[in-house]
Image (cartoon, grey):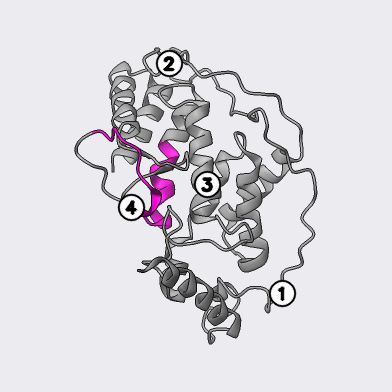
């Protein structure tokens, strides 16, 4: 809820020049940032309901009852929006969110996604539950300008397990960031302090000065320049069987994948 309001207020300021909306959005951004948990693996994790008090100590990611993947991008989209304008959230924050992908819900690096942000298999372990919480994963691709490997993890999910997506937003996002990671980008500069007043100003006609979407890649990151060569098939699409057989029966492959997730879950239960 805070992130949805923050996006609305920030966008309103960019369109109208209403500084009261700008200031409220900045306060919300600081409120949210102070309640993200920086785990011991260097990634950000958070619960569905943010804590009342700021988080001051790191924790093991396994100890966090993290938000489900279905709602997570609603939370993430506001920090990304602010980071693109260099306010409150920095390049370093975006790299921490990228680690959320690589060390959290997409940690298997083979297209398999878990239903919780921290990668825990403890909550969602049926096909119906899983397919209900990963529908918004395409939004995480917006972290690609900071870490191209994020795109690789998400692309592999679609090519392996959701090849026939009829969601035009999915397809548009994948096309956009596939083009970005195929182009070498420079090392990013540091973002302004979160207390700094945004440099974006509205014109007298209500049309804001356009800002540029980040196209920079952190030092040490490697861009993917290869065109995907995976050939999706029905047999290779066990995870999102509903995309191919919405009204049909569950393919055998889905059962095999669920067994893998359950084995992982059992290994974490004392």
Counting residues from the start of the chain, the first of labels 2 and 4 encountered is 4
In the depicted structure, whether residue 124 falls above or below residue 38: below
Q: Which residue is mark 4?
A: 63
Q: Is residue 69 magenta?
A: yes
Q: Is 139 inside the magenta-drawn segment? A: no
Closest to the observer, 101 or 195 = 101
Q: Look at the image and tell me in which quarter the N terminus lies.
A: top left
Quote the CA–CA distance across marks 3 and 2. Answer: 24 Å
Determine the CA span between mark 1 and mark 2.
Answer: 48 Å
Mark 1 or 2, closer to the camera: 2
Closer to the eye: label 3 or 2: 2
Q: Is the residue 171 above or below the residue 132 in the image?
A: above
Residue occupied by mark 2:
193
At horizontal 58% and vertical 59% (from top left) the residue drawn is 108
The structure residue drawn at horizontal position 60% and vertical position 34%, both measured from the top left corner, is 146
For label 3, the residue is 140
Q: Earlier in the sequence, mark 3 or mark 1?
A: 3
Mark 4 and mark 1 lie on one chain; the one further toward the N terminus is: 4
């Amino acid at each position: 809820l805070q992130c949805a309001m923050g996006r609305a207020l920030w966008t309103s300021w960019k369109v109208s020049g209403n500084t009261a909306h700008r200031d409220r959005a900045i306060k919300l951004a600081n409120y949210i940032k102070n309640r993200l948990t920086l785990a011991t693996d260097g990634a950000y994790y958070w619960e569905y309901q943010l804590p009342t008090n700021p988080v001051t100590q790191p924790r093991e990611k396994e100890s966090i009852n993290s938000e489900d993947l279905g709602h997570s991008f609603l939370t993430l989209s506001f920090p990304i929006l602010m980071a693109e304008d260099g306010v409150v959230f920095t390049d370093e924050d975006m790299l921490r969110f990228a680690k959320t992908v690589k060390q959290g819900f997409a940690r298997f690096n083979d297209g398999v996604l878990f239903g919780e942000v921290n990668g825990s298999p403890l909550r969602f372990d049926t096909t119906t539950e899983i397919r209900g919480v990963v529908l918004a994963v395409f939004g995480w691709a917006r972290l690609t300008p900071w870490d191209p490997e994020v795109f690789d993890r998400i692309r592999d999910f679609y090519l392996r397990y959701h090849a026939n997506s009829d969601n035009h937003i999915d397809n548009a996002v994948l096309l956009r960031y596939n083009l970005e990671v195929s182009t070498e980008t420079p090392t990013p500069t540091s973002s302004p302090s979160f207390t700094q007043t945004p440099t974006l100003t509205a014109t007298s006609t209500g049309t804001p000065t356009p800002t540029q979407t980040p196209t920079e890649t952190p030092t040490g990151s490697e861009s993917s320049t290869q065109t995907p060569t995976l050939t999706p098939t029905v047999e290779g699409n066990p995870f999102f069987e509903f995309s191919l057989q919405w009204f049909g029966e569950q393919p055998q492959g889905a059962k095999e994948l669920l067994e893998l997730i359950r084995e992982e879950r059992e290994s974490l239960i004392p």
